[in-house]
Amino acid sequence: MKVRDAMTSQCEFIEPDDNLQQAAQKMRDLNCGFLPIVRPSTGALEGVITDRDIVVRAVADGCDPTETLLNQIETPNVLYCYADDGLEAAADKMSEQGVYRLVVLDAPETKRLCGVLSLGDVVRHNEEMLAAETARHILINAA
């Protein structure tokens, strides 16, 4: 199975010039803790923002949520895979990096956001054993 067959393709994103408050409100409205940061004019992935980034990097440092832009606290080194990668290879990458989700890019040439692959997506596509093994490795490596 390819990543494109399991990923969530209707992926919400936020823009780099949006502020922390906008990101937090969007996460609340979507009931999520992770948003890719994409420049709409190019479709280029610029980073990601997590609820943890907002709390640990911004709130803890006293940043003003209406004045602090995402490009000031984003995680720039985004872990990703490609839509045509094998699902098992993507799960291996999650295990190695200790993450439960990967941004999915369309192709090495264009690197445009086309989805997100989470461990939940792997489970939803009847790959429970692969998901369980990946989660086990993530937890072991985190300890």
Image (cartoon, rainbow, N blue to C red):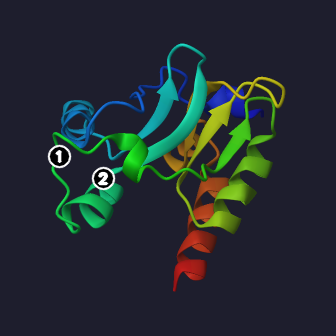
Residue 65 image label:
1
Q: Amino acid at mark 2?
A: Asp
113 vs 121, nearest the viewer = 113
Q: Amino acid at mark 1?
A: Pro
**SS for callout 1:** loop
Residue depth check, mark 2 versus mark 1: number of the one nearer the observer: 1
Q: Residue sitting at 65 percent across and 58 percent down?
A: 94
Above or below residue 106? Residue 137 is below
- Where in the figure is residue 36, as x and y percent of width and height? 47, 36
Q: Which residue is mark 2?
A: 51
Tell me which corner region of the image, top left, top right, bottom left or bottom right, holds residue 17. Answer: top left
Q: Which residue is most to the front?
A: 67
- Where in the figure is residue 27, as x and y percent of width and height? 26, 38
Q: Residue sitting at 60 percent across and 17 percent down?
A: 42
Q: In the image, 105: left or right of 140?
A: right
For the N terminus, the image quarter is top right
42 vs 116, nearest the viewer = 42
Q: In the image, 76: left or right of 27?
A: right
First of labels 2, 1 by sequence position: 2
Tell me which corner region of the image, top left, top right, bottom left or bottom right, holds residue 30. Answer: top left
**SS for callout 2:** helix
- Where in the figure is residue 124, as x and y percent of width and height? 53, 38
The alpha-carbon separation of the residues under discs 2 and 1 comes to 13 Å
**Category of crowding for the residue at label 1, using alpha-carbon neighbours closer than 10 angstroms: few (below 14), some (14–19), many (at least 20):** some
Above or below residue 25? Residue 10 is above
**Category of crowding for the residue at label 2, using alpha-carbon neighbours closer than 10 angstroms: few (below 14), some (14–19), many (at least 20):** some
